[in-house]
Image (spheres, rainbow, N blue to C red):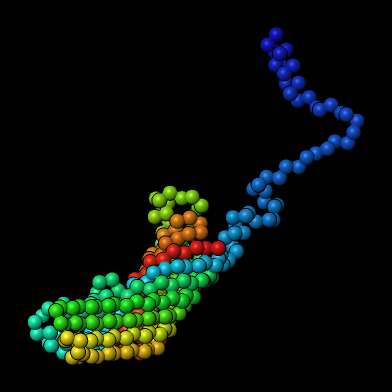
Amino acid sequence: MVIALFLAASISTGCQAPARTGGTPHFTETVSACDPSDDSPPAADHASRSPNKRWHADLAIRNSFPKLDSTQKQLDLRMDVPLRVDFLGVFDRPYTPIDRRSDQGFTSLYGGVGRQENPRFLWTYYFGGSTGKDINHGRFLIETLEVDFNYNFYYTGISAEYYPWEVPTIQTTPSWEERLLASRPFLLAGLETGYVSSEGEGDYDIAGITVYHDELKVRDWLFSCAVGLGWALPLNDRWSINLSSNYRFHFYRPEEYNGWAVTTGVRYRF
């Protein structure tokens, strides 16, 4: 009996209507984040539908390995005479552009600016160059052999990168594991024009008297196209490291200038 009365009192209390205050009831509407009547798209959907057109700046080092077939033949022919005159064999063979290409390639520095047009494609306009010299000076008693090379190379061009699995994106402070997982390969193609200027001069003296003198000058305007592969490693949401290798096809003197190039660069996205 007591239990029955307790249950009845509990039910009547839980179902009791709210007390009237004499004023008009005020209702507060709560809209759920998943309310289908809300027509505004989520922020993530809006960002994914907006074009990802971000500008970037590049700074890179390029190591080029041209064929130099014509240069090789010219050097072999022109240096054969002074090396034969040195019948005692006291001088080593001079260090030439051929040796530089074999050791480390022709190193140049370039900078560029570009833009990402969609999640898979971006372009970069760049300009760069290099200058250097190789000096060989040998002396033995009254014999002197001096062979010097000077070279300058300036270029500009435009390249396109295509990412089959989209341009890599990453959070602001990722771990190295996340960086490696987010890295992506890309296809590379480009057009380039440039100007090369090189000079070589050699003298063989005996007792201050020039026994042999020779010089060679090259002035060439170049135009080429390149195709290659690369890999992009994002460091954070702005910085990344780009590694690439390409083969360059020249329209003028291909036997001299065709060859591979390896590029190591950093990219900053604005």
Q: In screen coordinates, is 148 left or right of 83?
A: right
In the rendered image, the quadrant that contains the C terminus is: bottom right
Residue occupying the far top of the picture: 1
Which of 52 and 191 lies nearest the eye of the viewer? 191
- Residue at 91%, 30% (x, y): give it: 22
Q: Is residue 81 above or below residue 180?
A: below
Q: In screen coordinates, is 232 left or right of 133?
A: right
Specify the quadrant of the image occupied by residue 135: bottom left
Whole-percent x, y for residue 116 in the image? 52, 68
Residue occupying the far left of the picture: 88
Whole-percent x, y for residue 77 in the image? 19, 90
> How many badges with numbers are in the image?
0
- Residue at 24%, 78% (x, y): give it: 136
Q: In screen coordinates, is 83 left or right of 68?
A: left
- Residue at 37%, 77% (x, y): give it: 131
Residue 79 shows in this picture: no
Whole-percent x, y for residue 66 in the image? 30, 80
Which of 12 and 175 lies nearest the eye of the viewer? 175
Q: Is residue 211 above or below residue 156?
A: below
Specify the quadrant of the image occupied by residue 18: top right
- Residue at 42%, 68% (x, y): give it: 60
